[in-house]
Amino acid sequence: MLILASVLLIISLPSLALSYEMGNRVFSYTLTNGLKILMVERHLSPTVSFYIRHRVGAVDEIDGRTGTAHLLEHMLFKGTKTIGTKNYHEEQKILKLIAKTGKELDFEMMKGKNANKSRIQALSERMEVLHKQHKKWFVENEIDRLYVENGGDNVNASTGQDLTTYHVSLPSNKIELWARIEADRMTEPVFREFYSERNVVMEERKQRVESEPDGQLYEQFLATAFIAHPYRRPVLGWPSDMRFLSLEYTEVFFKRYHAPNKTVIAVVGDIDPANTLTIIKKYFGAIPSHQLDPSPITEEPPQKGERRVEIVSDANPQMVIGYHKPAMPDFDDYVFDVIECILSKGRTSRFYRALVEEKALAESAHAVNGLPGAKYDNLFAIFAKPRHPHTNAEVESAIYDEIEKLKIKPVTARELEKVKNQIKADFIRSLNSNLGLANLLSYFEAVTGSYQYITDHIKVIERVTSEDIMRVAKKYLTPNNRTVAQLVNKN
């Protein structure tokens, strides 16, 4: 009842009611170069939030170049020909020498045991000198500085399997500043400090994956669950690829995938849509589109039996279980949203009650629908950590018991109504802020091809029945469709 009351209260708020029925509130426009613009006018505060989504991620890389999309995300904070340079004409001379020397150094190092060590030493020293010379021609973090000094907030970026994202919130009188910066970043970026930033990204991998048992387990889980589809690749890239990521290929990758016809922009806040569109046309309208790559993404073949992988680490045991399933907007994906909530949403969820409270087998157990991406068929995953002295095997068995209950016993009307209210409340709450709404509008437009997913989501969730849950559980949550990754400590 408390959950239901909170949902009703949220829906009763004017701004959220408008978000709940968003269809006629979104101004949608496509420029002649293919750039998709979504705008929502909201005068809650004198601010505006921007999301730029490029339809490119780890799935678009080629073998041997994994990690390029993520490195490119870093490079696009390095400035442009007019932002971050003291004299681009002079700077360009040094940049050409750095690119030439870096390419020669990589080529020599690729020889491995047959490499000429004295040549590597000489080229490395040459690179160090050039980097020092380069520093006097550019200003570090100029894009960040411009945003922060003009009242910017939530300045950040991210790279995933499907998308690369840039977002910021600004005072509403700074729309043209945003357009000037971002259009320049889409047309005239300068990949300053490419080789040193490549080292930064490799260090990031060491911290997030190689030194983290959780990261190692998740990486091996995906590489086992997917044998053909590029979702098996880590977003950061494989180490041997990252060491030799090419400046030339990164520039080609940028031009191919950060084109306007691969981009969605969402603008939400204190705006006049007509005036904002005029500004966007002024700065983004002349950017040329790029012919889209017609080659298909390799499909994952149906799984024919359980796959298991074990990671040995000096860490507490844990596990990940995954099942292949369709991506949104397939109806079964909505059903999995409901299953996720039934199993692991809050202290009244089935996993928490059975595994954490009653049996005290697990420290934690939770489900996640839609990993590692959402554009292509993906995974319903379960993450669990046993409580000492219990084992992964005990927790795994208890998880399967809960899954079997979904197959043989209909979810009660009361429990189903409760989880639907939870989903509804969480979804509507995510639309409350300008940044949250811009996030979801751009995300669903970029992934599914239509922001209308927002307006349809709750309606489709309401259609899910206990029979749907039983059907989906029987169809997908089977041993033959299952991948299990375990981290064990054998000390």
Image (cartoon, rainbow, N blue to C red):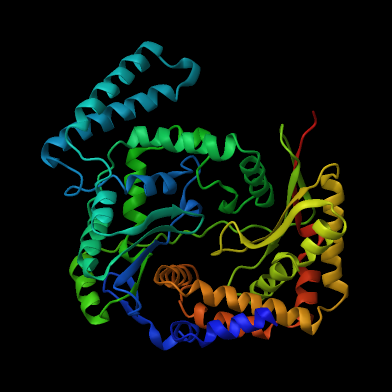
**How far across and down, in percent of the image, does residue 252 sit?**
33, 48
**How far across and down, in percent of the image, does residue 120 sit?**
37, 17
Q: Residue at x 26, y 40 (%)?
A: 140
Quarter holding residue 377: bottom right
Residue 384 showing in the rendered view: yes
Q: Residue at x 87, y 56 (%)?
A: 359
> Does residue 405 appear left or right of residue 11 in this picture?
right
> Does residue 320 appear left or right of residue 24 in this picture?
right
> Is residue 117 depicted above or below 133 in this figure?
above
Q: Which of 140 and 474 is in front in this view?
A: 140
Quadrant where the N terminus is found in the figure: bottom right
**How far across and down, in percent of the image, does residue 52 sit?**
36, 63
Residue 479 showing in the rendered view: no
Quadrant where the C terminus is found in the figure: top right
> Is residue 377 depicted above or below 103 in this figure?
below
> Is residue 427 depicted above or below 93 in this figure?
below
> Does residue 359 appear left or right of residue 386 in this picture?
right
> Is residue 108 depicted above or below 488 in this figure?
above
Q: Which of 187 and 19 is in front in this view?
A: 19
Q: Residue at x 68, y 51 (%)?
A: 225
Q: Which of 170 and 320 is in front in this view?
A: 170
**How far across and down, in percent of the image, does residue 228 sit?**
62, 51
